[in-house]
Image (cartoon, helix red, strand yellow):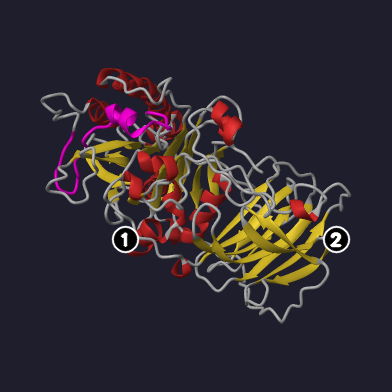
Amino acid sequence: MISITCGSSWYWQVNSAFHPPPKSTKMWASQFIFILLSLFATGAFAISNRDTKFVAAVYEHVFIAAENKSVVLSKQDAVAIVMRNMDIYESQMEKAKQKNASIIVFPEYGLTGFSYTRKSFKPFLEDIPDPTKIAWNPCQNPQTNHSTPILYRLSCLAKRYDMYVVVNMGDIKPCLTKTDQYCPTDGRYQYNTNIAFDNRGKLVARYHKQHPFMVEMEVINVPRFPEYISFDTPFGKIGTFICFDVLFYDPAVTLVNKHEIDHVVFPTAWFDVLPLFSAIGFHGSWARGMQVNFLAANTHVPPYLNTGSGIYSPNGVKSYYRSLSENGSLSIATLSKKPRDNLQNTSTGNTEKFKEVKNNEDSFYSDLFGDVFLFRELKESEGRLDVCYNKSEVCCGLSYKMKTKRADEMYALGVFDGLHTKEGQYYLRICTLIKCHGLDRKTCGQRTYNARTIFESFTLKSQLNTRYVFPQVVADGVSLLPGQWEHDRPVTYLKSKHQLSQSLLTAALFGRVYELDVNKSVPSSGAHMINNVILICILVLLGSFESSNIYVIYYFRSFEQFEKEFIYK
């Protein structure tokens, strides 16, 4: 008799097979062969599934921070704050382990909160070694002087729950101004840092953020050269970068293109900027455009619209969370270990060329987050529109059918080709179908969160002349529509598969032309010298406004300061 662990029914069948009725030998033999074949098939399927899939988790975290960010705490008090956040991390790791997660990702500044000064941030930092130079498992080999309690506990948690752990924290590196020409005047480098531990607690990755902005520049430094950090796992090769790094060629695009990355782990502190920069919309579009799995873990600060975490694949979102409630959330999904091997291009491709389009009285200009888009209003319940940006060859086309043309809502087809300069400088080519904020054409491009118009069908096509196009569709209430739309590869268009289940806010083909970006030097001689026009995600950016307005941007240390200082004149 053989004991089988596949369930009591299988046990009974196999047990009976080895003790057949004496007069049914032939029947027993055929049943036995069938049972063995079934067992082999079931086992092969399970093994095959284990070989091709894995479970991932990301956690959107409501961080605990110091009450007064300008006060310099003792090391003991700073670590105590970190440990309170880590208590929450541990509870989420336990939940993720129950779902068989192999990796979990936590957000940018999740252990500390943000808005500290350079001095007040220092007690939260630890000296993190380079794992490419030193093999170290903090849990097994803690520092003799106990100088890294944060790394020690993280390592032990990874080991205890037998999973890869990706965390964002601060790294500190002492330096001497006499011998290091780039050393900051206070004698130390401070870095916004991602770290990763394997499932045994070994430190396997350390990445320093490349693109900080404004007040964060007064707190952290950047590496002299972009870092391309990846690590191998049983479920694929993983790369990592932080928040607004995602919008630039280095390190993000280079990491995927030249280092054969399967998955990106992405701690972030991202504030929604509608219509084109919602966290869930943009991060999902990057996974599609770059053909990688993208694990985005965001901090959760609803008053700043700081929400939106998800697990995204090249074929669409697998799990996501966006909420203005008070609570964070754990998102879990099953992913392919080799995402590019499972791509299905169900579209036929966009081979139609745009003919010369003459913009007429139906065309109008309006500001969308500092960029002057050329729009055409959707005046009818169905139709076809084309629009080209001034005299450029950048064109967009739309065919659509609404279920009902509502009198209280306006939609427009927009195109842009130019250098974005509002809060940073990077070259964009964009086609978008958007819901306008109101019925005045000047509101097209302003933020809006709700819609009531249902589209029975639409196809948005583009002629952007760039290989880097990121497609997104965002629906009413800033939500996603998994499985309801598709695009070709390389991306030139997106279209609905059927009538949308929710009203449409935005559909966009977001093109980046990296070679036309303004060249930026990245000084490394201290936090104050970083280019002050690069955007970081821990900045509150709430939308687009009329081009005649003066847009004043601050990095807020409190919600009261946000209400007081986010001024438009």
Determine which residue is flagged by label 1: 259
Any mark on residue 379, and which?
2
Q: Position of residue 161 (x, y in %)?
A: 31, 29
116 in the magenta segment: yes
Could you tell me what secondary structure mostly forms the magenta stretch? Answer: loop
Is label 2 in a helix, a strand or a loop? loop
Q: In the image, is residue 271 above or below residue 281?
A: above
Any mark on residue 191, and which?
none
Q: In front: 265, or 122? A: 122
Residue at (75, 51) in percent of width and height = 443
Q: Position of residue 333 (x, y in %)?
A: 48, 41
Q: Quadrant of residue 349?
A: bottom right
Q: In the image, is residue 301 above or below residue 376?
A: above
Residue at (24, 32) in percent of width and height = 126
10 in the magenta segment: no
The crowd level at tag 2 (other Cα within 10 Å; few <14, some 14-19, many 20+) is: few
* Magenta residue span: 112-137
Q: In the image, is residue 379 above or below residue 267?
A: below
Q: Position of residue 483 (x, y in %)?
A: 62, 51
Residue at (79, 47) in percent of width and height = 438
| One can see residue 37 in this view | no
Label 2 vs 1, first from the N-terminus? 1
Amino acid type for the residue under numbered disc 2: Lys
